[in-house]
Amino acid sequence: MSTVNAVKVSSYDEELVYSAVSRHFDALDVASELRPEMRIVLKPNLLYGKKPSAGVTTNPAVLKAVIRWLRERGFENITVAESSGGIFTAEYMRGVYSASGFNVPGIKEYLNRDFTYGSKKTAEGFTVRSFNIITPILEADYIINLPKLKTHAMTTVSVGVKNLFGVIPGLQKPDMHRRYPRTDDFVHMLCELCETVRPNLTLLDAIDSMEGNGPGGGTVRHTGLTLCSRDVYALDMAAVSFMGLTPEDVPHLRAADAMGLTPDRVDITGDPVSPCSPAFRLPDAVKSTGFDDSVPKLLRGPARFVLDRLLRSYPSVDRSKCVGCGKCAESCPQKIISVENGKAGMPRKNCISCFCCQEMCPVHAISVKRGLRGL
Ligand code: SF4
Ligand code: SF4
């Protein structure tokens, strides 16, 4: 059994968020695990630079509250580290921090200044032999994972496990998509990455969440919740139940279950939590076609299996919205996107439906179309 602590928070008011963080850390007795000499690394979600109200990134109020809590207890060796979508350089990350509201007193003193990475071997028997991981994470003594609750076009949701993909440096992330083009293989890789990084604590920002075409182009939904746990899989299970889904609906939780990583029971402490009603709207890329919902529950698995082999989702550019920035081309693992005369073009041939392009498009010019495989 694993414990997930829940605290409701009505807004990003700094005192309210600080009070929630204190309740979580007291309930889980976090202070008992920390020593003053420890290098503590905070890993937020900074998909790309975006103002906090857009619901794409971990809100700076959460970072501020965690840093304040640590400092007030004498823990000063703190680093905020993330590798966003795009390149991993000081200049690029400065822009991301600034656009996301992180360049403010109480956070900016702790922003990572080391843009190197190293390799870490994985456990015996893993599919991936080693991962390249950003140096602050490699050198951390204690990792606090700070995801944002969002839907995700490829992995259905982005919570604690998916947030750790941001420890892979810069444009090596599209390389991982190229190596693991099938969702099932990709989420298996994510679980192996999670087991390699092993965050000590995960604190979820679900005060404002994202539904629909997440993780970058969805709609903000005020959900007023924070969750905290030492067990990232338990936290993800609690989060997807809150979204109105089941762990079986979520590819990485199915993979984690098959790998024996999920707890047999999740005990929710703190504030009572019930599933959102209506449930979170899913991304167009993973939305049910309606057919599998019309068949009995027992047959839904086989129905999905057949549909997945017949139909596929592809990105489609709205040329009237496209500003020709090239972010989609930069992030495409297959290198099939070209920008000509200020507009992006995306052929279906060789597309692996990873939706990195949609994720990174700053003006939401990319939507999803379902089509027969290969056509
Ligand atoms: S076009 Fe988009 S969905 Fe297709 S492989 Fe490239 S980034 Fe992935
Ligand atoms: S990222 Fe979006 S706006 Fe930029 S070139 Fe691609 S489709 Fe156009």
Image: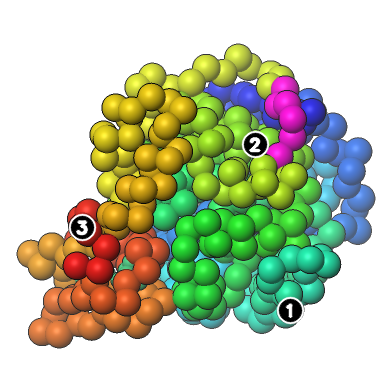
Give the mark, 1 or 3, whose residue is nearer the N terminus: 1
With 302 as the anchor, is 281 left or right in this view? left
Q: Position of residue 307 (x, y in %)?
A: 32, 48
Question: Judging from the image, what secondary structure is the residue with disc 2 in?
Answer: helix
Q: Earlier in the sequence, mark 1 or mark 2?
A: 1
Asked whether, in this view, residue 16 is left or right of residue 343, the answer is right
Q: Is residue 192 above or below residue 255?
A: below
Residue under numbered circle 1: 119
Q: Please, which residue is most extreme toward the left here?
A: 320
The prevailing secondary structure element of the residues shown in magenta is loop
Mark in front: 1 vs 3? 3
Residue 36 picture location, percent across and down: 90, 53
Please state the horizontal and vertical placement of residue 169, each as a whole percent of the image.
Answer: 58, 75
Residue appearing at x 31%, y 39% in the figure = 288
| Residue sitting at x 68%, y 36% | 234
Looking at the rendered structure, the kind of residue marked 2 is: Leu
Residue bearing mark 2:
235
Q: Quadrant of ligand 1?
A: bottom left
Depth order, front residue of 27/189: 189
Tell me, yes or no, if residue 105 can be seen here: no
Report the residue marked by disc 3: 371
Distance Cα–Cα, label 1 vs label 3:
39 Å
Residue 188 x/y as whole percent: 61, 58
Mark 1–mark 2 Cα distance, whole angstroms, equals 27 Å
In the image, residue 50 sits, relative to residue 220, either above or below, namely below
Q: Nearer the viewer, residue 359 or 304?
A: 304
Quarter occupied by the C terminus = bottom left
Residue 1 shows in this picture: yes
Image quarter for residue 154?
bottom left
Q: Is residue 22 left or right of residue 293?
A: right
Confirm or deny contact between disc 3 and disc 2 (CB under 8 A).
Answer: no
Q: Which residues are magenta?
A: 262-267
